[in-house]
Amino acid sequence: MPATQNTYHINLTTRGRTFAERGDGTRAVTEARASGVVLLPNQSNTVHWTPDAEQLILKIPRARLESHLADLVGHPVVEAVDFDFGFRTDSPRGRSLLSAVEFLARELDQPGGITETPLAREQLETFVMTQLLLAVRNSHSDLLEGYAGKARSARIRPVLAYLESHADQPLTPCDLARAGCMSVRALHATFQHELGVSPMAYLRRVRLDHVHAELLRLTSSDVRISDIAMRWGFYHPSRFARQYQERFGELPSDTARRTAPAR
């Protein structure tokens, strides 16, 4: 096929194999659900299929993809994005891209599906473009990775502030996601990447720290540990004691015994 000039073609092999060659001599071989190729708008391409080959072919208007990329990196994109010719679809990001395209394809064929909800379709299309830019190495990958890291750090700060100031209240992942203006899935991914724990595990850690601080400030042996624990959301005494010991190396009663004045 000649250079399209205005469209990126992404070929995702789902059965069989393909053999592709780009105008500059670059070659790639794709295998079912393991790899694909990106056909650039400024390169001619030749693709041969095995008899059993099947593909999902995603066509993205050049202006749409480059405008979306410009929004992500914060400056205009004036030349065609130079993607690697071949890429993996069995990597974590590659699988996410393939799954999103398959979902989009199913919904477009389904009566009453996403074709009748333009806003949802646009959001899914945007997600697919982002996954493509992250899954396939390209001339802007370093900037994108830097952007993603900064975005995660910036997005998690309001969540942590909200969590700290509301730790004594019933909180759910949905509450925390709303505080950070993100989806629950993005919330979990951000916490795992930045802090190495889930949002609720981090919340439990914060609450245990508050209990520990209160026990260290005890001025009377009449204060019940269970009351302090319940104030910070721990309603199961044995589970609370185990979690406290895992974090501080001693039982809450040991902490209280060391700090509270004797009767």
Image: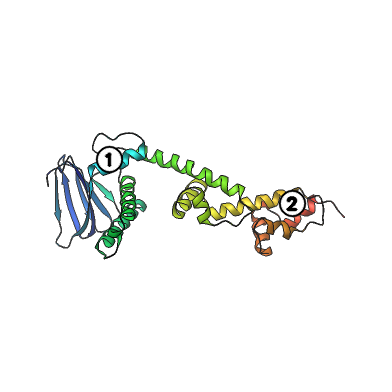
Q: CA distance from mark 2 to mark 1?
A: 57 Å
Report the residue at 39% width, 41% height from top. 145
Disc number placed over residue 262 in the picture, else none: none
The answer to whether residue 24 is above or below residue 260 is above
Q: Say which amino acid is labelled 1.
A: Glu
Report the residue at 67% width, 50% height from top. 210
Q: Say which amino acid is labelled 2.
A: Leu
Image x and y of residue 120, in percent:
34, 55
> What residue is disc 2 on?
215
Image x and y of residue 8, in percent:
22, 45
Among the two numbered marks 2 and 1 on one chain, the one whose residue lies closer to the N terminus = 1
Q: SS class of the residue under badge 2?
A: helix
Give the quarter of the figure containing the C terminus: bottom right
User: Is residue 234 shown to the viewer in this render?
Assistant: yes
Residue 26 image-quadrant placement: top left
Direction left: furthest residue: 2
> What residue is disc 1 on?
66
